[in-house]
Amino acid sequence: MSTPSPDQRRRVAVTGAAGQLGRAVVRHLRESGWDVLALDRRTPDDDGEFLAVDLTDYGQVLAALSGGVDEHGPVEAVVHLAAIRAPGLVPNAATFANNVPSTYNVFAACRAAGIRNVVWASSETVLGLPFDTPPPYAPVDEEYTPRPESTYSLGKTLEEEMARQFCRWDPRLKMFGLRFSNVMDPEDYQRFPEFDNDVHARKWNLWGYIDARDGAQAVRRALDHEATGADVFVIANADTVMSRSSVDLMAEVFPGVEVRGDLGEHETLLSIDKARRVLGYEPEHSWRDERDHTGPAGPTRQQG
């Protein structure tokens, strides 16, 4: 991929830039030729352009995105990743009070500032996680109505509806929600084989994951895709976290659930067919290839 000249570089703001996925997205977009304004409450580890912003304050968000801050110009696109990242980290009302108003502020500020290219982090949780009620079929996809089972997931579902209404108000907008799976870095892969000890340990997201680098690729492809309107995409890696076959996993844990199509041996049960077809997304990393090249570490339960 060739790097554009300075006068051709596009400018994007990334919220949640100091987070696990945010760091990968900022790095990938900069390497891909974007000028990136990193937004977060805490300073990222790199020395790139950064602005501390409280996303629950609409005035701060609008100023940050429209160039109303000294030494920081306006942007033409926004990647919104900032959020309390999973259920159960803080009380439910605090999760809702942070996540949903922050997303509204970003969406509204983009509309007010004339920013029409918005990519934001929805979540796999809208698919019905932790699947205490079995999924309607597998691999799960974007075709059935969201089934939020937590306050965190309820917020993400409402944000998807917000995006649809914002795009109805302004048909020139593009708002793509990426339903990220459990975000992983390469150092997390050393403990993946332990999941084989209990087939139920990771059934809560159908044994899925997303390598942060592939998540960043999906963000770039969503930004580059020329379209208008709201849409959502499941973003996961092409395989599961398990050594057992996907067919065996479904047969043991969800024996009554319809399996659609012929599954590959370790094929993801979080369907990425739509992201492949529309965005050209194709995962480039797998824990099976990289586990032996990383040091020991433990994966965390983190959701997009």
Image (cartoon, helix red, strand yellow):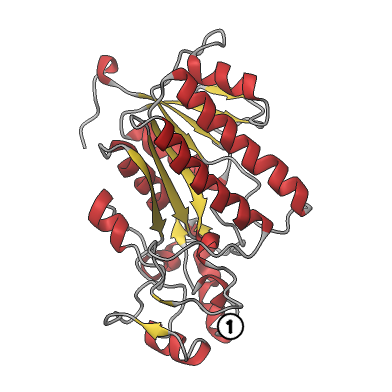
Residue type, mark 1 in image: His
- The part of the image, by quadrant, that contains residue 269 is bottom left
Label 1 secondary element: loop
x and y percent of residue 177 in the render?
Answer: 44, 47
x and y percent of residue 4 in the render?
Answer: 24, 24
Task: Identify which residue, 183 or 227, lies in the foreground.
Answer: 227
Lateral position of residue 52 relative to residue 219, left or right = right
Residue at the spot of label 1: 200
Query: Most extreme residue toward the top, as rendered?
Result: 70
Relative height, residue 263 to residue 227 (above, below): below
x and y percent of residue 282 in the render?
Answer: 28, 57
Relative height, residue 83 to residue 38 (above, below): below
Lateral position of residue 55 relative to residue 28, left or right = right
Task: Identify which residue, 69 or 4, lies in the foreground.
Answer: 69
x and y percent of residue 142 in the render?
Answer: 39, 61
Lateral position of residue 114 relative to residue 275, left or right = right
* Residue 47 appears in the picture as rendered: no
**Which residue is painted at 30% across and 22% down in the image?**
9
- The part of the image, by quadrant, that contains residue 224 is top left
**Which residue is painted at 73% across and 54% down in the image?**
89
**Which residue is painted at 57% across and 49% down in the image?**
158
- The part of the image, by quadrant, that contains residue 43 is top right
Q: Residues within 10 Å of mark 1 (few under 14, many from 20)?
A: some
Quadrant (top left, top right, bottom left, bottom right) of the N terminus: top left
**Which residue is painted at 41% across and 51% down in the image?**
215
